Amino acid sequence: MSRNYSASQFEQTFVPKRLQMYEVPQDPQPGVHPKATLSLNASNFITNEHGHLLPGIKRSERSPFGEFIGTWDLPKRIPGPYHVHPMGRTEKSFDALCAQRDQTIKEMEKARVYEKEGSSIQQTS
């Protein structure tokens, strides 16, 4: 039985290209190995050893937690690619996809807005 089935026959289904993920991966620089690009992008510290922000680092005006959006704040369903192509679609379906994308963007922006009392959890109740 194991001669007929291998794990690789099911892996192609879960490749991001086939799943049509909504994020487009960045292409590495031509001629540079992908692992080498990690060392080129050095990270900078924004806090000291006590966890306080360093001078010159601006604090977020909206929330003490920055621009973080939790899973509960996101829309129920995030539609496919944000780059919607009209090729091979009727005008009606293309407009519906654009409207769905715009609605999702509005919901995500609404999740970023915090009331004076605190978190976005209080907005929904």
Image (cartoon, rainbow, N blue to C red):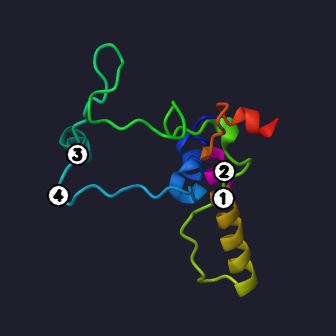
**Furthest residue toward bottom:** 91
Badge number at residue 37:
3
Question: Circles 1 and 2: CB distance less than 8 Å?
Answer: yes
Q: Earlier in the sequence, mark 2 or mark 4?
A: 4
* Frontmost residue, 32 versus 116: 116
* Frontmost residue, 23 versus 19: 23
Q: Position of residue 5 (x, y in %)?
A: 61, 41
Q: Earlier in the sequence, mark 3 or mark 2?
A: 3
Question: Circles 2 and 4: CB distance less than 8 Å?
Answer: no
In the image, residue 109 lies in the stretch drawn in magenta: yes
User: Residues in magenta?
Assistant: 107-111
Which numbered mark, 1 or 3, is in the foreground of this view? 1
- 30 w.r.t. 47: above or below: below
Instruction: Name the residue type under label 1.
Output: Lys
Badge number at residue 31:
4
Other-residue count near label 1 (Cα within 10 Å), few / some / many at <14 / 14–19 / ≥20: few
Instruction: Name the residue type under label 2.
Output: Lys
Task: Give the labeled residue for mark 1.
Answer: 106
Other-residue count near label 3 (Cα within 10 Å), few / some / many at <14 / 14–19 / ≥20: few
Which residue: 64% across, 36% down?
A: 116
Q: Secondary structure at mark 1?
A: helix
In the image, residue 68 lies in the stretch drawn in magenta: no
Q: Secondary structure at mark 2?
A: helix
Other-residue count near label 2 (Cα within 10 Å), few / some / many at <14 / 14–19 / ≥20: some
